[in-house]
Image (cartoon, grey):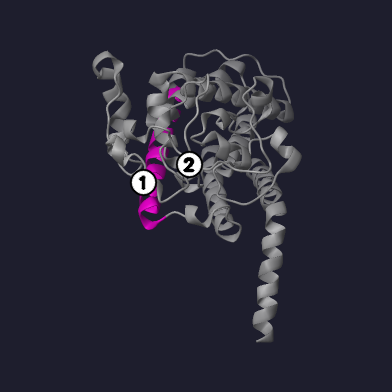
Amino acid sequence: MRQTIMLSSVKNQLRRLFPFTCYPLIVLTLIGYSIFVLQQGIDLGLAAFTSVLIIIAYFIIMERVIPFKTRWHPSKREWSRDGLCFILVIVYGAVSETLVRVAALHIAPLENTMSLAQNTLLAILVGSFIGYWLHRLEHRHLLLWSFHGIHHRPNKVTVSNNSVVHFLEVLLSALVIQTTFLLLGFSAEGMFIAGQFTALHGYFIHANVNIRMGWLNYIVATPELHRFHHSIELKEAGNFGSDLSLWDQLFGSFFYRPDRSPIQVGVTKPHLFPSAFEVAKGILHPFRWFISKHGNRPRYTRATQLFQEYDNEPRSTPSTMDIRKR
């Protein structure tokens, strides 16, 4: 009995500690991992993929230890979908890498005389700046939204459904950012470390973890900020930065309310997108939209069945915003 009480006390203390240590712990882990990889001369491609698996495993554990919403824990059906989507993302990434390598044969990069620290810092700034504007454009223009909206279709924000993305989005992001890196002549080591930062935040901001980042919200992208980005309330669905929040502040799309969170996440018009579980239809959706008569988007669900997939989430009325997001 006494041991049970002590064990319960330790668990409670850890749960109180993890909200403060969750982010710095994984950051320090990746810093140590990156130093080890560079010192040992390990293949950077293999090392980058391994780090993604480490990041995913870490946040899956954290989602169970300090969940933001327990009802957002993935169901078996969602695990199956997200697992399939992750495999597809690996394939998309391989195709993107091949295209970038082909482009590299025809690119004359600038001469690089910068240090590793300079390469890394500039790669993070340049990559996050391009990523910010690509993301913002995907919410402004319907053609881009037709494939980016697939990522917003789930009614939860979790580390696993970060992989629910369309291959056109993966290709666009990889080609634009990686080609820019090649033109600027960033070193492979600098791009590797910058990639660790980008991958970390890509999964971190989707993690269903109950943490408060405080002043760091004004520097880096966080789960607190990104949940608002997934909100169906368009007036609060800014925060387009996926790794740095500095660009959102600079260009007027920053939204942060430390005292609350979005009522509901997803898309305001789910009947205009396939179900989040219909992966094949999601892949075909942008092409169906593009060839549809007069640009009218195809419909998948009756309006009366609009919210059937939303698992009894609280309802709210969508507002409007100058950014045509949904």
Q: Which residues are magenta?
A: 75-101
Q: Is residue 194 above or below residue 19?
A: above
In the rendered image, the vertical position of residue 181 relative to residue 199, given as above or below = above
Nearer to the camera, 199 or 226: 226
Question: Compared to 187, does 199 lie above or below?
Answer: below
Residue at the disc numbered 2: 162
Residue 127 within the magenta-colored segment of the rendering = no
Position of residue 259 measured from the top left corner of the image (x, y, whole percent): 68, 43
Residue 153 point in image, percent of width and height:
40, 37
The kind of residue on which mark 2 rests is: Asn
Q: Indicate the quadrant containing the N terminus: top left, top right, bottom left or bottom right.
A: bottom right
Query: Which residue does the numbered mark 1 point to in the structure image?
Result: 309
Magenta-colored stretch includes residue 100: yes
Say which amino acid is labelled 1.
Glu
Question: Which is in the foreground here, disc 1 or disc 2?
Answer: 1
In percent of the image, x 68 and y 45: which residue is there?
27
In the rendered image, residue 141, in percent from the top left (x then y), is placed at: 44, 18
Q: Is residue 245 left or right of residue 84?
A: right
Residue placed at 34% from the left, 39% from the top? 306
